[in-house]
Image (tube, rainbow, N blue to C red):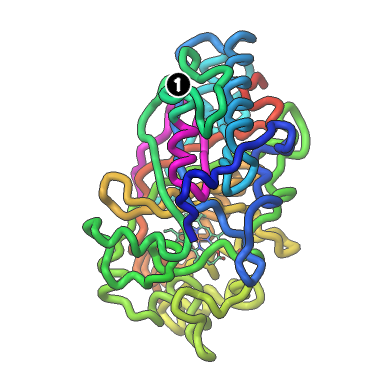
Amino acid sequence: MSVTDSSDIASGDPNERPLRQHAWNDVLTADEDGNRLLPEHHVLVPLRLVTAPDEDARTQVESAFRSLERAYAYAPEGVLFAVGYSAAYFDRIGGKTAPIPAPRELTPMESPAFDTFDAVIHLASDHPAAVLEAEEALFGATGTPNGTGMEATLSGVFERADPRRTGFVGAGLPAEHTDVEGVPETIPEEAPSLMGFRAGFRGSQAPEDRITIREGPFEGGTTMHISSLNLQLDPWYGQDSHEQRVAKLFSPEHTEGGGIGTVGEKLGSTTGVADGAASRVEADARTRGVVGHAQKAARARDDDGTPPLLRRDFSTVDGDTPGVHFVSYQRSIDEFVRVRKAMTGRDIAGEGVGQRLNNGILQYVFVRRRGNYLVPPRSKRALPQP
Ligand code: HEM
């Protein structure tokens, strides 16, 4: 549960941080089934470059990040963060082909806005005060985050861009937002996400090694895709029964044999979709008229069964609208595209399910924005050059 007493915010040492910006797993806590729990509070801070990315700027940016690492521990009680750079950044600094593709539409059902700013910082902590203060410190709005001095800020190199995004994940947090229109009162008290179920089981997340770039100038880095999705929760909770929600999110088989519990608590550390349900997608569409989201997505696992995506997504009520900021880390954006295609399930539309109807959760999820980022290894996180 939330730790809200700001006197508990731990300070840190840059030398304790690993080489990979995305290496958070070692310090994340786990639930009783061994599934890693993300920090509860998240901010995505968009940045626009306002100066030439020269050595002075690079030194300044690195110094700001190191100051943050002194102010906050490498832990959910401190602040975890990763900075990524867009194709727009690499185009702007010139040179050869950008090492990250510009975002594009990934389904025939969307016309999203695209992130066209230069960089984004994903900040996360169990303390809401820590993520906010860390963000302010980066722009000089506070000089002593968690009582520690900043040696530099991002100001003069980066300015803030739009849209800044925020959110939360963890048991009990979604139910605190039923005052927002479109967030039904019936959301389970203990639900960790606005759709009401646990996600990110150990068995369905890529290991950090699987998402790490293996060679080239950004060896040790990764990529990040951010999709911002709106959710239609009134029909999800109002028209569908618990069993229908389970069938559409997991698979129709998950409604059998006593079910998975209110929020998926009976699942342990795996949904099991890769052991059968993933290969029954077409059959379930034809014979049961419904197919689950997880069962479709698991079709895109590697041949040896490893999931290619490490999902670090969170719920949001930004703009007083329920949604998800779907932050996904993977070795290359192609892999995200491959999984998204499996999730979209065009191959089964018209084969017992519709393009959206009963085709996983597509009826409730609307893509508003997409962005792609290269997340360099920590040693190159300040204004990288290919
Ligand atoms: C509102 C948005 C979404 C919700 C509520 C949601 C929820 C879930 C849930 C409950 C599971 C099963 C538990 C788990 O394995 O973690 C799951 C699995 C998964 N989802 Fe989503 N998801 C959403 C969007 C997406 C998107 C946009 C993608 C991108 C392609 C995605 C990819 C996956 C993958 C790869 C799996 C694991 C499949 C496997 O076991 O290999 N999800 N999701």
Q: Which residue matches tag 1?
A: 140
Residue drawn at 62 percent across, 29 percent down: 99
Give x and y (percent) for residue 176. Answer: 33, 60
Q: Is residue 373 left or right of residue 274?
A: left
Taking depth in this image into account, of 156 and 282 the one nearest to the observer is: 156
Snapshot quadrant of residue 82: top right
Mark 1: amino acid:
Gly
Residue drawn at 47 percent across, 49 percent down: 5
What secondary structure is marked by label 1?
loop
The crowding category of the residue bearing disc 1, from other C-alpha atoms within 10 Å (few below 14, some 14 to 19, many at least 20), is: some
Give x and y (percent) for residue 356. Answer: 36, 64
Q: Is residue 82 left or right of residue 304?
A: left
Residue drawn at 37 percent across, 49 percent down: 367
Taking depth in this image into account, of 356 and 230 the one nearest to the observer is: 230
Tell me if residue 109 can be seen: no
Taking depth in this image into account, of 305 and 212 the one nearest to the observer is: 212
Where does the magenta region start and end? Answer: 110-135
- The answer to whether 374 is drawn above or below residue 250 in the figure is above
Q: Quadrant of the C terminus?
A: top right
Taking depth in this image into account, of 180 and 4 the one nearest to the observer is: 4
Tell me if residue 243 can be seen: yes
228 in magenta: no
